Image (cartoon, helix red, strand yellow):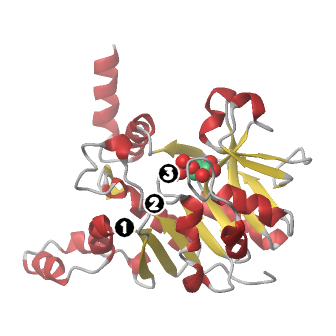
Amino acid sequence: MDNQKVKKAVLPVAGYGTRFLPATKATPKEMLPIIDKPLVQYAVEEAAQIGIKDIIFITSHTKESIEKHFNRSYELEDKLITSKKNTYLEKINPDLFKDLTFTFINQEEQLGLGHAISLAKNEIQDEPFAVLLPDDLFFSEPSCMSQLLNVYNQYKSSVIAVNKIDKANIHKYGVISSKDNASPYKIDFIVEKPHAKDAPSNIAVCGRYILSSNIFEHLENVKKDDSGEIQLTDAIQSLLEKEAVMACLYEGEKYDCGSKKGFVEATIKLALNDDSLKKDITSFIREIVE
Ligand code: G1P
């Protein structure tokens, strides 16, 4: 991976979003808005901000609104111009997206995150690439992807974002272990969703990765887990037996928007970050909790 730039990102968006039913019956989970922007757009912006040019969605036929959202809508643009609402043009077609190419690959069967990533093989070829799981929303400066890119540039190896988690929640995540005492950690071992008693540490995988394209041959070789899914974590364990994989302790705030709690928290947090809402929302919260 010597000096190879990270130009492509894979975003798996084919999941059913069952935790948000009935909202997700006709609307993809990734299109649910946090304030005025769909969840998936935050991940696309984070990727674009580190210079990624190709966004590859692993999607399903039920999710065409994601494709519509990232395609230009000339009809709407014309309408906004003729009705002198030009300020909205930047909102529907942000400058940041001008150089981006969006590709949509259909995942016909839901066979897990590892399977989803494996479908991007032909698009990625032999370049290092980013993976962003849009459910995880990160707020920080520099961004989570930018923190990973720094480690990637330094070590020229795959790197995944991690954070420290209490044992009670560790069974929801991939968990790593390392002999290193501080970040970036060289990973010795990684396991998907262990029971708290078996977890090798309290350091859990968050939904941002930069991976060597060698991951594809490992994805081809890993076996399905007990639930019939191909886990990315298992392929990373197999990869790190051949080449270094680093973990970067993410500095910033993270919201799990795949859960209702995280989704609501992220909404409140973004409202409080928004100058046009902050004052009203702060007094509203004070009023209802007193
Ligand atoms: C996936 C990964 C897991 C990781 C998590 C981060 O799990 O398989 O290793 O810790 O994302 O959000 P999921 O949340 O899709 O079940």
Q: Position of residue 202 (x, y in %)?
A: 74, 36
Q: Are marks 3 and 1 in contact (CB under 8 Å)?
A: no
Amino acid on which disc 2 is placed: Gln
Give the alpha-carbon distance from disc 3 to disc 1, as whole Å: 22 Å
State the residue lying farthest toward the right. Answer: 179
Q: Is residue 274 left or right of residue 288?
A: right
Q: Secondary structure at mark 2?
A: loop
Circle 2 packing at 10 Å, graded few (<14), some (14-19), many (20+), is some
Give the alpha-carbon distance from disc 1 to disc 2, as whole Å: 9 Å
Please identify the quadrant where the C terminus is shown: top left
Residue beneath disc 3: 137
Q: Position of residue 198 (x, y in %)?
A: 77, 33
Residue beneath disc 1: 60
Is 163 above or below relative to 84?
Answer: above
Q: Quadrant of residue 163?
A: top right
Q: Earlier in the sequence, mark 3 or mark 1?
A: 1
Please identify the quadrant where the N terminus is shown: bottom right
Q: Are marks 1 and 2 in contact (CB under 8 Å)?
A: yes
User: Between 271 and 152, which is closer to the camera in this rendering?
Assistant: 152
State the residue lying farthest toward the left. Answer: 83
Amino acid on which disc 1 is placed: Ser
